[in-house]
Image: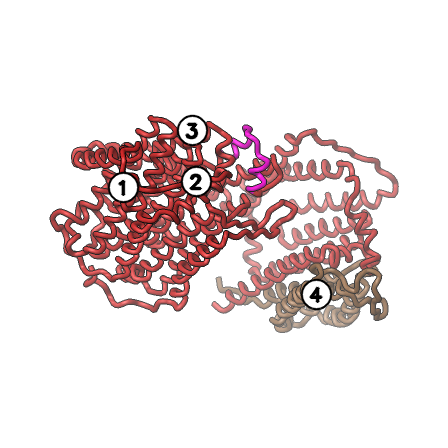
């Protein structure tokens, strides 16, 4: 494959090394902060809504932040060597590297923010930030339709579910008046509303962690470059889902239904993911199905509803991230060396790539929980928590682990053993060394698990809000966990031996999932929404009148519904008319007549004059109502608008204006346009009348304005409001005018320069 | 539109309209009107000259630096807000504070709110003339 490479195009930006160094530097800083006792930052954000920039590097935050930055460091290092080759294969410039590394670092920063956020709105913001970064990362090869489709699928599934997270947060806010998690944990009592809010958040988490039935986006997302898959789908994006469940766990555990739901979803995901992984031929897809199966364990462990389960879940996430990212990076290196992506095209690579074979072997051993790897303790903690809950859970855990043993054993054995299928070109060391480094970490933690158990205990403490003691050690006896581990190996070997015979039924199961599974529903929904959107768009853009109607009619209908459905109803008072109101009534009559007259003329100039009369009439109304400032501004604005209209008309060729003036209304629209006008105008009238009929508030702010105007050295209250009391609003408004000026002049100059 | 009569009338009205604009600006804090209204009045005075100018002269006088005036106005407003913020006070709070001594020039009082109003005047004047000037100086595209 290396022989096909063309000379590199473009140069790598000087920013890229700095971006690569971000990850190890962040990891070191976070580790130092964690070892020194953690850190908490709490600053006001929007005090009126009780929103705070509240971050805490507690156990849970530290675990996920360290995993995101630690695995991120290995992935960024790997990408340093992988990406130039990837871009060269596709005939793309090296300059595109900056975008890739920038997005990866953005994702990493969003994950750290998500892990440490203690405010639900802040959590939502970082949640969405990870979705946006992942969209661009999955679609990095944007010239490929499959990448674009996969990115959109991931964005929609995780983005739509993010709305559930926000709704859950709003339910809690409406009940307890805060978005702060520590305060919510203190105040929340078991109730239907809390269970509903927690359930919505759990759903968001399950979608992000690709749990059944939201799992279909994850295998599709494998069209991303290998480092993206390694990072997003082992240590970051899918981890964010279970992080959320761990973060809001004190709310989740108030409902037995939710815990049972987690158990069921987790167990089903373990089985479905495992069976589908065993049937896959594409290397990355095996790992993708494996990932959502593994996260099924984590969800299952949270569903156990115990401190031991929460600690086991936290430990499992860390162990899985280390090993699974190494396996994704292995798949990338193997494809780089051989050009093959399918297991059926591979074999016997152990001799030509010994270090990669050894390192990925350790990674596989970690996921399948062999002794001397950190994975062994991960499964031991799982087995211990499952045994505590009951025999059925113990059996389910063992069966799931045996399935994992089988499909990952097949993955490694097919690639590295047996007869050689393809020659392997040498690959750069940086494509292998990060895998070796991750394998070393897995081994080190397998020999000395204390740092990781300490972190997992702290993470579980943040979830269950009570002290948790987690121990991991090798016991050479026949305790239940050891027997379960032995059963796992035996079952795994048996399944591995049977995997050949199982291929046909499992492939049929996969096809069945595609034809009647949730992905089918997703595709149907997207197509239906797209079709509806196209139809509305076509209707809207047909002509100018339809475009105006498309705004007025829905707005009118919505306001009408609100007027009818408003609790307590509305009063409509006519008030009394006195002789002194004669001038006001005459001006109103003039305005009405001018508005009706504006519907008659065909010539544009007459139309401008009629509309101008409406505007001047309204200015007169303001004057009679005792608002001379508003009247003056209305007159001036009307004058400017009239001049603007005349200027635009002067630009249009006279022939075009004559032709347009002769167009008659189509018979089909003879009644439609008046109807639209009557509906929208009638609703606006009812709304204004209803609003004006409302009794004045007990203490209107205008009274304060009048009282404070002399203190602001002003005799004109309106000017004092605009330039002083509400000066900041005015500043924002004039900024908008400034932007409009810049836009118009730029457009006109661009047009003239063509 | 650009007859001799309109040209003479427009010229005669130019200075009085600008004086009215200045009066609205200066008296805005004591009477009807403010920087926005003053800016529109001044802009209309200039537009009147453009409309009355003979032949293509109107287009020629619609010079391109009016957007710069708008930009200066906006920059002035932002700088004023920044200067007040740098003092540690609320954004666009008025100085001198209530009860403080104020320097007066005729009826005009030199306070930050009036300075802000002057920046609004410049922005509105520049914006109206910039947009109208951009339209007026646009070349017709051949059909």
Q: The chain shown in red is which?
A: A
Q: Residues within 10 Å of mark 4 (few under 14, many from 20)?
A: few
Colour given to chain B in the rendered image: brown
Q: Earlier in the sequence, mark 2 or mark 1?
A: 1
Which residues make up the magenta segment? A181-199
Q: Residue A643, located in which quarter of the rendered image?
A: bottom right
Residue A469 got which mark? 2
Q: Chain of mark 2?
A: A
> Disc 2 on helix, strand or loop?
loop
Tell me the mark number nearer the camera, choosing from 4 and 2.
2
Q: Residues within 10 Å of mark 2 (few under 14, many from 20)?
A: some
Check if residue A70 falls in the magenta segment. Answer: no
Marks 1 and 3 close (CB-CB < 8 Å): no
Q: Chain of mark 4?
A: B
The residue indicated by pointer 4 is B87
Q: Earlier in the sequence, mark 3 or mark 2?
A: 3
Asked which secondary structure carries label 4, the reply is loop
Q: Quadrant of residue B74?
A: bottom right
Is A556 placed left or right of A506 in the picture? Answer: right
């Amino acid at each position: 494959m290396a022989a096909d490479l063309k000379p590199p195009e473009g140069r790598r930006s000087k920013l890229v090394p700095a971006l690569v160094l971000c990850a190890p530097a962040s990891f070191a800083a976070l580790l130092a902060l964690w070892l020194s006792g953690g850190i908490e930052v709490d600053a006001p954000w929007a005090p009126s809504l009780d929103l705070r920039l509240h971050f805490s590097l507690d156990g849970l935050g530290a675990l996920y932040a360290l995993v995101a930055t630690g695995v991120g460091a290995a992935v960024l290092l790997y990408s340093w060597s992988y990406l130039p080759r990837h871009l060269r294969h596709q005939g793309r410039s090296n300059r595109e590297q900056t975008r890739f590394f920038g997005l990866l670092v953005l994702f990493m920063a969003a994950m750290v923010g998500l892990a440490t956020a203690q405010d639900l709105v802040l959590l939502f913001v970082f949640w969405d930030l990870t979705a946006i970064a992942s969209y661009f990362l999955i679609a990095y090869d944007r010239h490929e339709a499959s990448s674009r489709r996969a990115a959109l699928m991931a964005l929609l599934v995780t983005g739509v579910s993010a709305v559930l997270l926000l709704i859950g947060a709003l339910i809690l806010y409406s009940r307890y008046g805060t978005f702060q998690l520590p305060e919510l944990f203190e105040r929340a009592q078991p109730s239907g509303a809390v269970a509903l809010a927690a359930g919505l958040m759990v759903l968001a988490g399950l979608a992000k962690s690709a749990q059944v039935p939201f799992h279909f986006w994850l295998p599709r997302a494998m069209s991303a470059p290998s480092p993206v898959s390694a990072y997003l789908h082992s240590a970051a994006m899918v981890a964010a889902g279970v992080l959320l469940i761990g973060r809001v766990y004190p709310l989740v555990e108030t409902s037995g239904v939710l815990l049972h739901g987690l158990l069921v979803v987790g167990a089903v995901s373990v089985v479905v993911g495992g069976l589908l992984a065993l049937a896959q031929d594409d290397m990355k897809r095996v790992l993708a199905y494996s990932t959502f199966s593994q996260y099924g364990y984590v969800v299952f462990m949270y569903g156990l509803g115990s401190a031991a389960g929460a600690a086991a879940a936290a430990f499992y996430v860390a162990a899985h991230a280390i090993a699974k990212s190494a396996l994704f990076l292995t798949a990338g290196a193997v494809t780089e060396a051989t050009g093959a992506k399918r297991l059926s095209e591979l074999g016997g690579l152990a001799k030509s790539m010994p270090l990669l074979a050894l390192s990925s072997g350790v990674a596989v051993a970690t996921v399948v929980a062999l002794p001397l790897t950190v994975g062994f303790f991960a499964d031991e903690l799982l087995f211990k928590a499952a045994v505590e809950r009951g025999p059925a859970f113990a059996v389910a855990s063992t069966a799931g682990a045996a399935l994992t043993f089988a499909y990952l054993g097949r993955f490694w054995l097919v690639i590295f053993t047996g007869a050689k299928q393809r020659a392997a070109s040498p690959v750069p060391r940086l494509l292998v060394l990060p895998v070796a480094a991750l394998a070393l970490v897995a081994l080190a933690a397998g020999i000395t698990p204390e740092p990781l158990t300490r972190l997992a205990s702290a993470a579980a403490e943040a979830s269950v809000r009570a002290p948790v003691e987690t121990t991991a050690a090798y016991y050479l006896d026949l305790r239940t966990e050891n027997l379960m581990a032995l059963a796992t190996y035996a079952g795994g070997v048996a399944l591995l031996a049977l995997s050949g015979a199982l291929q046909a039924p499992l492939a049929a199961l996969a096809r069945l999932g595609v034809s009647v599974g949730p992905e089918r529903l997703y595709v149907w929904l997207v197509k239906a929404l797209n079709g509806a959107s196209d139809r509305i768009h076509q209707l809207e853009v047909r002509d100018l009148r339809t475009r105006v109607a498309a705004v007025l009619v829905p707005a009118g209908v919505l306001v009408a519904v609100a007027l009818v459905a408003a609790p307590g109803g509305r009063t409509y008072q006519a008030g009394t008319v006195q002789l002194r109101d004669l001038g006001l009534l005459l001006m109103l009559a003039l305005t009405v007549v001018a508005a009706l007259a504006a519907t008659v003329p065909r010539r544009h100039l007459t139309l401008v004059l009629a509309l101008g009369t409406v505007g001047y009439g309204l200015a007169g109304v303001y004057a009679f109502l005792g608002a001379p400032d508003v009247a003056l501004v209305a007159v001036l604005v009307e004058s400017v608008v009239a001049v603007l209209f005349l200027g635009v008309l002067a630009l249009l060729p006279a022939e075009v204006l004559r032709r347009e003036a002769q167009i008659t209304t189509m018979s089909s629209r003879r009644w439609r346009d008046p109807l639209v006008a009557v509906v929208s105008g009638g609703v606006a009238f009812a709304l204004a009348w209803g609003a004006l009929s409302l009794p004045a508030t007990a203490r209107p702010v205008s009274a304060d304005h009048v009282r404070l105007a002399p203190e602001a050295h002003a005799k004109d209250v309106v000017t004092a409001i605009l330039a002083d009391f509400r000066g900041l609003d005015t500043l924002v408004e004039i900024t908008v005018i400034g932007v409009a000026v810049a836009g118009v002049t730029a457009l006109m100059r661009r047009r003239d320069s063509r | 539109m650009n007859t001799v009569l309109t040209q003479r009338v427009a010229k005669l009205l130019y200075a009085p309209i600008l004086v009215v604009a200045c009066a609205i600006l200066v008296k805005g804090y004591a009477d009807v009107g403010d920087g926005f209204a003053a800016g529109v009045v001044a802009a209309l005075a200039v537009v009147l000259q453009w409309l009355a100018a003979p032949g293509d002269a109107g287009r020629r006088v619609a010079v391109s630096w009016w957007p710069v005036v708008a930009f200066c106005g906006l920059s002035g407003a932002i700088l004023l807000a920044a200067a007040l913020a740098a003092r540690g006070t609320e954004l666009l709070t008025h100085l001198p504070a209530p009860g403080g001594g104020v320097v007066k020039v005729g009826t005009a009082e030199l306070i930050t709110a009036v300075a802000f109003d002057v920046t609004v005047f410049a922005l509105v004047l520049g914006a109206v003339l910039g947009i109208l000037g951009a339209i007026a100086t646009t070349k017709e595209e051949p059909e």
